[in-house]
Image (cartoon, coloured by chain):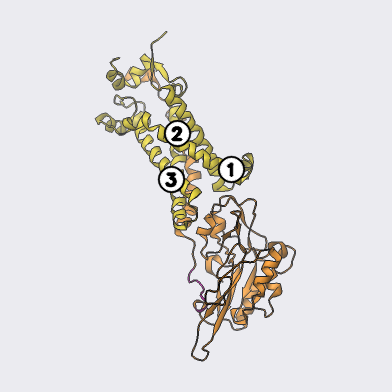
Chain colours: A orange, B yellow
Amino acid sequence: MANETTNNRKALLVTPEACIGCRACQVACKSWNQLPGIKTTNQGTYQNPPDLASAALNIIRYSEVPSQENPVRWLFVSRRCMHCEDAGCMTVCPSGALYRTPEGAVAYDRDKCIGCKLCVTACPFDVPRYDADGKVTKCHLCVDRIGAAMQPACVKTCPTGALKFGDRNDLISTAKKDGFTTIYGEKDLSGLGTIYAFKDEPQLYGMKQNPSIPSSVVFWHTYLKPLSLFGLGGVVAAAAIHYLAIGPHKEKEEEKEV
Amino acid sequence: MAEMVRKSSVDEIVNHWILAGSCFLLMITGYAFLFHIDAISNVFGGYNSMKNVHNWGGVVFIISLLYSIRHYLIDALHYDADDVQWFKVAGGYLSHKVTVPPMGKYNPGQKLYYLAILGAGIAIALSGLAIWLLKDNAALLLISHLVHNVSFSIFVIAVPVHIYLGTFANPGTFQLMVSGTLSLESAKKRYPKWMKAAGKM
Protein backbone atom coordinates (compact mmCIF):
# COMPACT_ATOMS: atom_id res chain seq x y z
CA MET A 1 0.00 0.00 0.00
CA ALA A 2 1.35 3.40 0.94
CA ASN A 3 5.02 3.53 0.17
CA GLU A 4 6.41 6.97 0.64
CA THR A 5 9.82 6.14 2.03
CA THR A 6 12.02 9.14 1.99
CA ASN A 7 15.74 9.08 2.57
CA ASN A 8 15.43 11.46 5.50
CA ARG A 9 12.83 9.42 7.33
CA LYS A 10 13.08 9.95 11.06
CA ALA A 11 12.33 7.30 13.66
CA LEU A 12 12.03 6.76 17.36
CA LEU A 13 14.29 4.02 18.65
CA VAL A 14 13.29 2.27 21.87
CA THR A 15 15.94 0.29 23.69
CA PRO A 16 13.99 -1.57 26.37
CA GLU A 17 17.21 -2.89 27.91
CA ALA A 18 18.14 0.68 28.87
CA CYS A 19 14.68 1.54 30.23
CA ILE A 20 14.41 1.84 34.02
CA GLY A 21 10.64 2.20 34.03
CA CYS A 22 10.65 5.72 35.47
CA ARG A 23 7.79 6.81 33.22
CA ALA A 24 9.19 10.30 32.79
CA CYS A 25 8.25 9.85 29.11
CA GLN A 26 4.59 9.44 30.11
CA VAL A 27 4.73 12.61 32.19
CA ALA A 28 6.59 14.61 29.54
CA CYS A 29 4.01 13.55 26.95
CA LYS A 30 1.16 14.71 29.16
CA SER A 31 2.96 17.93 29.90
CA TRP A 32 3.74 18.86 26.30
CA ASN A 33 0.38 17.72 24.91
CA GLN A 34 -1.57 19.19 27.84
CA LEU A 35 -3.35 15.95 28.68
CA PRO A 36 -5.31 15.45 31.91
CA GLY A 37 -4.55 12.78 34.50
CA ILE A 38 -6.43 9.51 34.54
CA LYS A 39 -7.88 7.99 37.71
CA THR A 40 -6.87 4.35 37.81
CA THR A 41 -7.08 1.50 40.26
CA ASN A 42 -4.40 -0.99 41.22
CA GLN A 43 -4.69 -3.99 38.93
CA GLY A 44 -1.88 -5.91 40.59
CA THR A 45 0.84 -4.36 38.45
CA TYR A 46 2.91 -1.22 38.51
CA GLN A 47 1.92 -0.57 34.90
CA ASN A 48 -0.14 2.58 35.10
CA PRO A 49 -2.30 3.60 33.33
CA PRO A 50 -3.16 0.03 32.32
CA ASP A 51 -3.35 0.79 28.59
CA LEU A 52 -3.15 3.59 26.05
CA ALA A 53 -5.93 6.15 26.43
CA SER A 54 -6.99 9.46 24.92
CA ALA A 55 -5.00 11.09 27.74
CA ALA A 56 -2.15 8.56 27.63
CA LEU A 57 -0.50 8.56 24.22
CA ASN A 58 2.46 6.52 25.43
CA ILE A 59 2.81 4.09 28.31
CA ILE A 60 5.51 1.89 29.72
CA ARG A 61 4.41 -1.73 29.63
CA TYR A 62 5.63 -3.63 32.70
CA SER A 63 6.15 -7.34 32.14
CA GLU A 64 7.28 -9.50 35.01
CA VAL A 65 9.27 -12.31 33.43
CA PRO A 66 11.33 -14.08 36.09
CA SER A 67 14.39 -15.90 34.82
CA GLN A 68 16.70 -18.49 36.35
CA GLU A 69 19.27 -15.97 37.56
CA ASN A 70 16.82 -13.12 38.21
CA PRO A 71 13.61 -14.05 40.03
CA VAL A 72 12.30 -10.44 39.99
CA ARG A 73 13.09 -9.53 36.41
CA TRP A 74 10.97 -6.66 35.10
CA LEU A 75 10.89 -5.85 31.43
CA PHE A 76 9.91 -2.31 30.46
CA VAL A 77 8.89 -1.35 26.97
CA SER A 78 7.49 1.89 25.64
CA ARG A 79 4.16 1.35 23.91
CA ARG A 80 2.73 3.96 21.54
CA CYS A 81 1.89 4.53 17.87
CA MET A 82 4.34 2.66 15.64
CA HIS A 83 4.16 5.20 12.79
CA CYS A 84 4.02 2.41 10.21
CA GLU A 85 5.26 3.18 6.72
CA ASP A 86 2.31 1.13 5.48
CA ALA A 87 -0.17 2.69 7.89
CA GLY A 88 -3.57 0.97 7.97
CA CYS A 89 -5.13 3.92 9.78
CA MET A 90 -4.09 6.37 7.06
CA THR A 91 -5.23 4.00 4.35
CA VAL A 92 -8.70 3.55 5.77
CA CYS A 93 -9.35 7.09 7.07
CA PRO A 94 -12.22 8.50 4.97
CA SER A 95 -11.50 12.16 5.61
CA GLY A 96 -7.72 12.34 5.29
CA ALA A 97 -7.49 13.37 8.95
CA LEU A 98 -4.56 11.00 9.46
CA TYR A 99 -1.57 12.10 7.46
CA ARG A 100 2.18 11.64 7.05
CA THR A 101 4.48 14.41 8.21
CA PRO A 102 7.64 15.22 6.21
CA GLU A 103 9.63 13.47 8.95
CA GLY A 104 7.65 10.25 8.40
CA ALA A 105 5.43 10.40 11.49
CA VAL A 106 1.72 9.58 11.25
CA ALA A 107 -0.05 12.64 12.65
CA TYR A 108 -3.68 13.74 12.60
CA ASP A 109 -5.77 16.81 11.93
CA ARG A 110 -8.30 16.87 14.75
CA ASP A 111 -10.69 19.19 12.86
CA LYS A 112 -10.83 16.82 9.91
CA CYS A 113 -11.56 13.71 12.02
CA ILE A 114 -15.18 12.61 11.60
CA GLY A 115 -15.04 10.13 14.48
CA CYS A 116 -15.81 7.01 12.41
CA LYS A 117 -13.31 4.80 14.30
CA LEU A 118 -12.25 2.94 11.17
CA CYS A 119 -8.62 3.69 12.07
CA VAL A 120 -9.12 1.70 15.27
CA THR A 121 -10.13 -1.39 13.31
CA ALA A 122 -7.34 -1.00 10.73
CA CYS A 123 -4.49 -0.54 13.22
CA PRO A 124 -2.38 -3.71 13.65
CA PHE A 125 -1.25 -2.48 17.10
CA ASP A 126 -4.53 -1.33 18.69
CA VAL A 127 -3.23 2.22 19.08
CA PRO A 128 -5.79 4.94 18.16
CA ARG A 129 -8.01 6.14 21.00
CA TYR A 130 -10.98 8.50 20.94
CA ASP A 131 -11.36 11.45 23.28
CA ALA A 132 -14.53 12.75 24.92
CA ASP A 133 -15.35 14.78 21.78
CA GLY A 134 -15.21 11.64 19.62
CA LYS A 135 -11.95 12.67 17.93
CA VAL A 136 -8.93 10.46 17.29
CA THR A 137 -5.86 10.77 19.49
CA LYS A 138 -2.56 8.93 19.46
CA CYS A 139 1.17 9.57 19.60
CA HIS A 140 2.13 11.93 16.76
CA LEU A 141 5.85 12.03 17.65
CA CYS A 142 5.24 15.60 18.87
CA VAL A 143 4.62 16.79 15.33
CA ASP A 144 4.86 20.39 16.48
CA ARG A 145 8.31 19.80 18.00
CA ILE A 146 9.96 17.64 15.35
CA GLY A 147 8.69 20.04 12.69
CA ALA A 148 10.80 22.69 14.45
CA ALA A 149 13.85 20.40 14.53
CA MET A 150 13.35 19.53 18.21
CA GLN A 151 13.04 16.10 19.78
CA PRO A 152 9.71 14.60 20.89
CA ALA A 153 8.97 15.44 24.53
CA CYS A 154 9.39 11.83 25.66
CA VAL A 155 12.82 11.54 24.06
CA LYS A 156 13.91 14.90 25.45
CA THR A 157 13.12 13.78 28.98
CA CYS A 158 14.34 10.17 28.89
CA PRO A 159 17.22 10.01 31.39
CA THR A 160 18.81 6.78 30.16
CA GLY A 161 18.77 7.03 26.40
CA ALA A 162 16.17 4.25 26.16
CA LEU A 163 14.31 6.58 23.78
CA LYS A 164 16.23 8.09 20.89
CA PHE A 165 14.97 10.13 17.96
CA GLY A 166 16.84 10.70 14.74
CA ASP A 167 17.57 9.50 11.24
CA ARG A 168 16.03 6.06 10.89
CA ASN A 169 18.90 4.44 9.01
CA ASP A 170 21.48 5.85 11.43
CA LEU A 171 19.54 4.63 14.46
CA ILE A 172 19.31 1.13 13.04
CA SER A 173 22.95 0.84 12.06
CA THR A 174 24.13 2.26 15.39
CA ALA A 175 21.93 -0.15 17.33
CA LYS A 176 23.24 -3.10 15.31
CA LYS A 177 26.81 -1.96 15.89
CA ASP A 178 26.04 -1.86 19.61
CA GLY A 179 25.17 -5.52 19.54
CA PHE A 180 21.38 -5.45 19.33
CA THR A 181 20.66 -8.42 17.12
CA THR A 182 16.95 -7.84 16.57
CA ILE A 183 15.52 -4.53 15.41
CA TYR A 184 11.77 -4.94 15.82
CA GLY A 185 9.95 -3.04 13.09
CA GLU A 186 12.86 -2.75 10.68
CA LYS A 187 10.87 -4.47 7.94
CA ASP A 188 7.35 -4.93 9.34
CA LEU A 189 4.64 -3.02 7.45
CA SER A 190 7.30 -1.62 5.10
CA GLY A 191 9.20 -0.42 8.14
CA LEU A 192 7.91 1.06 11.36
CA GLY A 193 8.67 4.57 12.56
CA THR A 194 8.90 3.35 16.15
CA ILE A 195 11.59 0.68 16.21
CA TYR A 196 12.88 -1.42 19.07
CA ALA A 197 16.40 -2.70 19.70
CA PHE A 198 16.48 -6.11 21.39
CA LYS A 199 19.08 -8.65 22.35
CA ASP A 200 16.38 -11.09 23.48
CA GLU A 201 13.31 -12.31 21.64
CA PRO A 202 10.88 -9.38 21.11
CA GLN A 203 8.01 -11.68 22.15
CA LEU A 204 9.51 -11.78 25.65
CA TYR A 205 8.63 -8.09 25.89
CA GLY A 206 5.12 -8.69 24.56
CA MET A 207 5.84 -7.42 21.07
CA LYS A 208 3.36 -8.56 18.44
CA GLN A 209 4.61 -11.14 15.97
CA ASN A 210 4.06 -10.43 12.25
CA PRO A 211 1.79 -7.40 12.62
CA SER A 212 -0.50 -6.92 9.62
CA ILE A 213 -3.35 -4.76 8.43
CA PRO A 214 -6.73 -6.61 8.41
CA SER A 215 -7.13 -8.48 5.13
CA SER A 216 -10.51 -6.87 4.43
CA VAL A 217 -8.90 -3.44 4.51
CA VAL A 218 -6.12 -4.60 2.19
CA PHE A 219 -8.70 -6.13 -0.19
CA TRP A 220 -10.77 -2.96 -0.12
CA HIS A 221 -7.76 -0.75 -0.81
CA THR A 222 -6.25 -2.97 -3.50
CA TYR A 223 -9.37 -3.99 -5.43
CA LEU A 224 -12.58 -2.25 -4.39
CA LYS A 225 -11.31 1.33 -4.51
CA PRO A 226 -9.94 1.01 -8.06
CA LEU A 227 -13.06 -0.96 -9.08
CA SER A 228 -15.39 1.81 -7.95
CA LEU A 229 -13.44 4.32 -10.00
CA PHE A 230 -12.67 2.32 -13.14
CA GLY A 231 -16.08 0.62 -12.97
CA LEU A 232 -17.84 3.95 -13.30
CA GLY A 233 -15.41 5.19 -15.95
CA GLY A 234 -15.72 1.90 -17.83
CA VAL A 235 -19.52 2.04 -17.88
CA VAL A 236 -19.55 5.63 -19.11
CA ALA A 237 -17.02 4.77 -21.83
CA ALA A 238 -18.92 1.60 -22.79
CA ALA A 239 -22.17 3.57 -23.00
CA ALA A 240 -20.56 6.16 -25.27
CA ILE A 241 -19.08 3.44 -27.50
CA HIS A 242 -22.41 1.60 -27.61
CA TYR A 243 -24.23 4.78 -28.59
CA LEU A 244 -21.79 5.50 -31.41
CA ALA A 245 -21.13 1.96 -32.65
CA ILE A 246 -24.54 0.31 -32.29
CA GLY A 247 -26.86 3.17 -31.55
CA PRO A 248 -30.12 3.53 -29.69
CA HIS A 249 -33.29 1.52 -30.24
CA LYS A 250 -35.41 3.00 -32.97
CA GLU A 251 -39.08 2.13 -33.09
CA LYS A 252 -39.38 2.53 -36.85
CA GLU A 253 -36.71 -0.08 -37.53
CA GLU A 254 -38.49 -2.50 -35.25
CA GLU A 255 -41.67 -1.97 -37.26
CA LYS A 256 -39.88 -2.95 -40.46
CA GLU A 257 -38.63 -6.16 -38.91
CA VAL A 258 -42.03 -7.22 -37.61
CA MET B 1 -54.44 13.80 -30.00
CA ALA B 2 -53.23 10.27 -29.67
CA GLU B 3 -54.52 8.19 -26.79
CA MET B 4 -52.03 8.11 -23.93
CA VAL B 5 -51.25 5.21 -21.60
CA ARG B 6 -50.02 5.75 -18.07
CA LYS B 7 -47.06 3.53 -17.27
CA SER B 8 -45.76 5.23 -14.12
CA SER B 9 -48.01 6.63 -11.42
CA VAL B 10 -47.31 10.08 -9.97
CA ASP B 11 -46.49 8.34 -6.71
CA GLU B 12 -43.91 6.17 -8.48
CA ILE B 13 -42.34 9.09 -10.34
CA VAL B 14 -41.98 11.24 -7.21
CA ASN B 15 -40.48 8.35 -5.25
CA HIS B 16 -38.12 7.45 -8.08
CA TRP B 17 -36.78 11.03 -8.14
CA ILE B 18 -36.29 11.01 -4.36
CA LEU B 19 -34.44 7.71 -4.75
CA ALA B 20 -32.36 9.01 -7.66
CA GLY B 21 -31.57 12.30 -5.92
CA SER B 22 -30.53 10.71 -2.64
CA CYS B 23 -28.55 8.03 -4.50
CA PHE B 24 -26.68 10.70 -6.48
CA LEU B 25 -25.94 12.67 -3.31
CA LEU B 26 -24.69 9.54 -1.55
CA MET B 27 -22.47 8.56 -4.47
CA ILE B 28 -20.91 12.00 -4.73
CA THR B 29 -20.20 12.21 -1.00
CA GLY B 30 -19.17 8.55 -1.00
CA TYR B 31 -16.55 9.18 -3.66
CA ALA B 32 -15.36 12.20 -1.67
CA PHE B 33 -14.83 10.00 1.39
CA LEU B 34 -13.22 7.21 -0.63
CA PHE B 35 -10.67 9.42 -2.38
CA HIS B 36 -10.42 12.37 0.05
CA ILE B 37 -11.75 14.84 -2.52
CA ASP B 38 -11.51 18.15 -0.66
CA ALA B 39 -13.17 20.02 -3.54
CA ILE B 40 -16.39 18.08 -2.84
CA SER B 41 -16.17 18.05 0.96
CA ASN B 42 -15.69 21.83 0.93
CA VAL B 43 -19.02 22.22 -0.86
CA PHE B 44 -20.66 20.48 2.10
CA GLY B 45 -18.71 22.50 4.67
CA GLY B 46 -16.01 19.96 5.47
CA TYR B 47 -15.89 16.25 6.15
CA ASN B 48 -17.82 16.43 9.42
CA SER B 49 -20.90 18.09 7.95
CA MET B 50 -20.56 15.97 4.80
CA LYS B 51 -20.78 12.92 7.07
CA ASN B 52 -24.13 14.19 8.38
CA VAL B 53 -25.37 14.80 4.84
CA HIS B 54 -24.23 11.29 3.85
CA ASN B 55 -25.82 9.62 6.90
CA TRP B 56 -29.18 11.37 6.67
CA GLY B 57 -29.18 11.12 2.90
CA GLY B 58 -28.85 7.39 3.48
CA VAL B 59 -31.94 7.42 5.69
CA VAL B 60 -33.93 9.13 2.91
CA PHE B 61 -32.53 6.65 0.39
CA ILE B 62 -33.47 3.50 2.29
CA ILE B 63 -36.99 4.74 3.09
CA SER B 64 -37.48 5.59 -0.56
CA LEU B 65 -36.01 2.24 -1.67
CA LEU B 66 -38.28 0.25 0.65
CA TYR B 67 -41.27 2.29 -0.57
CA SER B 68 -40.36 1.41 -4.17
CA ILE B 69 -41.04 -2.26 -3.39
CA ARG B 70 -44.77 -1.63 -3.92
CA HIS B 71 -44.03 -0.37 -7.44
CA TYR B 72 -41.60 -2.95 -8.75
CA LEU B 73 -41.01 -6.04 -6.62
CA ILE B 74 -43.89 -8.25 -7.81
CA ASP B 75 -43.01 -7.63 -11.47
CA ALA B 76 -39.30 -8.16 -10.72
CA LEU B 77 -39.98 -11.62 -9.35
CA HIS B 78 -41.86 -13.01 -12.36
CA TYR B 79 -40.08 -14.36 -15.43
CA ASP B 80 -41.25 -16.34 -18.45
CA ALA B 81 -39.84 -18.02 -21.57
CA ASP B 82 -39.72 -14.71 -23.46
CA ASP B 83 -37.45 -13.37 -20.74
CA VAL B 84 -34.99 -16.22 -21.33
CA GLN B 85 -35.09 -15.49 -25.05
CA TRP B 86 -34.52 -11.79 -24.27
CA PHE B 87 -31.20 -12.64 -22.68
CA LYS B 88 -30.23 -14.80 -25.68
CA VAL B 89 -30.52 -11.76 -27.94
CA ALA B 90 -29.06 -9.46 -25.25
CA GLY B 91 -32.26 -7.44 -25.32
CA GLY B 92 -31.43 -6.35 -28.86
CA TYR B 93 -28.79 -4.00 -27.55
CA LEU B 94 -25.84 -5.60 -29.31
CA SER B 95 -27.48 -5.74 -32.72
CA HIS B 96 -30.60 -4.22 -34.25
CA LYS B 97 -30.97 -7.17 -36.62
CA VAL B 98 -32.07 -9.72 -34.02
CA THR B 99 -35.71 -10.23 -33.14
CA VAL B 100 -36.47 -9.22 -29.58
CA PRO B 101 -39.29 -11.28 -28.03
CA PRO B 102 -42.44 -9.44 -26.93
CA MET B 103 -42.11 -7.90 -23.49
CA GLY B 104 -44.46 -7.10 -20.64
CA LYS B 105 -44.27 -3.96 -18.55
CA TYR B 106 -40.59 -4.55 -17.76
CA ASN B 107 -37.89 -6.50 -19.54
CA PRO B 108 -35.85 -9.04 -17.52
CA GLY B 109 -32.82 -6.73 -17.53
CA GLN B 110 -34.86 -4.12 -15.70
CA LYS B 111 -36.27 -6.73 -13.34
CA LEU B 112 -32.85 -8.08 -12.41
CA TYR B 113 -31.55 -4.54 -12.12
CA TYR B 114 -34.26 -3.80 -9.59
CA LEU B 115 -33.42 -6.90 -7.55
CA ALA B 116 -29.71 -5.98 -7.63
CA ILE B 117 -30.43 -2.42 -6.48
CA LEU B 118 -32.84 -3.64 -3.80
CA GLY B 119 -30.30 -6.19 -2.51
CA ALA B 120 -27.28 -3.89 -2.70
CA GLY B 121 -29.39 -1.04 -1.34
CA ILE B 122 -30.47 -2.96 1.75
CA ALA B 123 -26.88 -4.18 2.24
CA ILE B 124 -25.41 -0.70 1.89
CA ALA B 125 -28.04 0.76 4.22
CA LEU B 126 -27.61 -1.85 6.95
CA SER B 127 -23.81 -1.66 6.78
CA GLY B 128 -24.04 2.13 6.73
CA LEU B 129 -26.19 2.14 9.85
CA ALA B 130 -23.67 -0.14 11.55
CA ILE B 131 -20.76 2.13 10.57
CA TRP B 132 -22.74 5.10 11.84
CA LEU B 133 -24.20 3.75 15.07
CA LEU B 134 -22.32 0.60 16.08
CA LYS B 135 -18.74 1.74 15.48
CA ASP B 136 -17.50 0.55 18.86
CA ASN B 137 -17.86 -3.06 17.71
CA ALA B 138 -14.59 -3.40 15.78
CA ALA B 139 -15.37 -6.71 14.07
CA LEU B 140 -18.80 -5.48 12.95
CA LEU B 141 -17.27 -2.21 11.75
CA LEU B 142 -14.71 -4.06 9.58
CA ILE B 143 -17.34 -6.31 7.99
CA SER B 144 -19.71 -3.38 7.48
CA HIS B 145 -16.95 -1.35 5.84
CA LEU B 146 -16.35 -4.19 3.39
CA VAL B 147 -20.06 -4.76 2.67
CA HIS B 148 -20.60 -1.01 2.25
CA ASN B 149 -17.82 -0.81 -0.33
CA VAL B 150 -18.82 -3.95 -2.24
CA SER B 151 -22.37 -2.58 -2.52
CA PHE B 152 -20.97 0.79 -3.52
CA SER B 153 -19.11 -0.83 -6.41
CA ILE B 154 -22.35 -2.50 -7.53
CA PHE B 155 -24.13 0.86 -7.42
CA VAL B 156 -21.54 2.87 -9.32
CA ILE B 157 -21.50 0.27 -12.09
CA ALA B 158 -25.22 -0.56 -12.27
CA VAL B 159 -26.72 2.91 -11.89
CA PRO B 160 -24.92 4.54 -14.87
CA VAL B 161 -26.03 1.58 -17.03
CA HIS B 162 -29.61 2.19 -15.86
CA ILE B 163 -29.34 5.91 -16.63
CA TYR B 164 -27.92 5.28 -20.10
CA LEU B 165 -30.59 2.70 -20.97
CA GLY B 166 -33.31 4.99 -19.63
CA THR B 167 -32.19 7.97 -21.67
CA PHE B 168 -29.91 7.88 -24.74
CA ALA B 169 -30.16 4.18 -25.52
CA ASN B 170 -33.97 4.19 -25.63
CA PRO B 171 -35.27 7.52 -26.90
CA GLY B 172 -38.68 8.30 -25.46
CA THR B 173 -38.11 6.37 -22.26
CA PHE B 174 -37.09 9.31 -20.11
CA GLN B 175 -40.56 10.87 -20.33
CA LEU B 176 -41.86 7.93 -18.28
CA MET B 177 -40.03 9.48 -15.32
CA VAL B 178 -41.42 12.94 -16.14
CA SER B 179 -45.04 12.61 -17.27
CA GLY B 180 -45.30 8.87 -16.73
CA THR B 181 -47.29 8.43 -19.92
CA LEU B 182 -46.63 7.36 -23.49
CA SER B 183 -48.79 7.02 -26.57
CA LEU B 184 -50.90 3.88 -26.94
CA GLU B 185 -49.17 3.25 -30.24
CA SER B 186 -45.70 3.20 -28.63
CA ALA B 187 -46.93 1.15 -25.71
CA LYS B 188 -48.27 -1.54 -28.04
CA LYS B 189 -44.88 -1.77 -29.74
CA ARG B 190 -42.75 -1.72 -26.63
CA TYR B 191 -44.90 -3.56 -24.10
CA PRO B 192 -47.23 -5.80 -26.14
CA LYS B 193 -47.83 -8.37 -23.40
CA TRP B 194 -48.65 -5.67 -20.88
CA MET B 195 -51.07 -4.04 -23.30
CA LYS B 196 -52.69 -7.41 -24.02
CA ALA B 197 -53.08 -8.05 -20.31
CA ALA B 198 -54.65 -4.61 -19.95
CA GLY B 199 -57.08 -5.42 -22.77
CA LYS B 200 -55.83 -2.67 -25.08
CA MET B 201 -54.51 -5.02 -27.75
- Classed neighbour count for the residue bearing mark 3: other residues with Cα under 10 Å, few (<14), some (14–19), many (≥20): some
Q: Is residue A37 left or right of residue A231?
A: right
Q: Residue furthest bottom?
A: A69
Residue to which mark 3 is pinned: B126
The residue tagged 1 is: B50
What secondary structure is the magenta-colored segment mainly? loop
Which chain does the residue under circle 1 lie in? B
Task: State which region is magenta.
Answer: A204-210
Image point 62% across, 77% down: which residue?
A: A173
Q: x, y (%) of residue B36?
A: 59, 48
- Residue at the location (46% across, 31% down)? B163
Residue under circle 2? B64
Q: Are marks 3 and 2 in contact (CB under 8 Å)?
A: no
3D distance between C-alphas at marks 1 and 2: 21 Å
Q: Which amino acid is tagged 2? A: Ser
Asked whether A52 or A139 is in front, the reply is: A52
To the question of a shared chain for discs 3 and 1, the answer is: yes
Q: Does the stretch in magenta take in A50? A: no
Residue A154 shown left or right of residue A202 in the figure: right
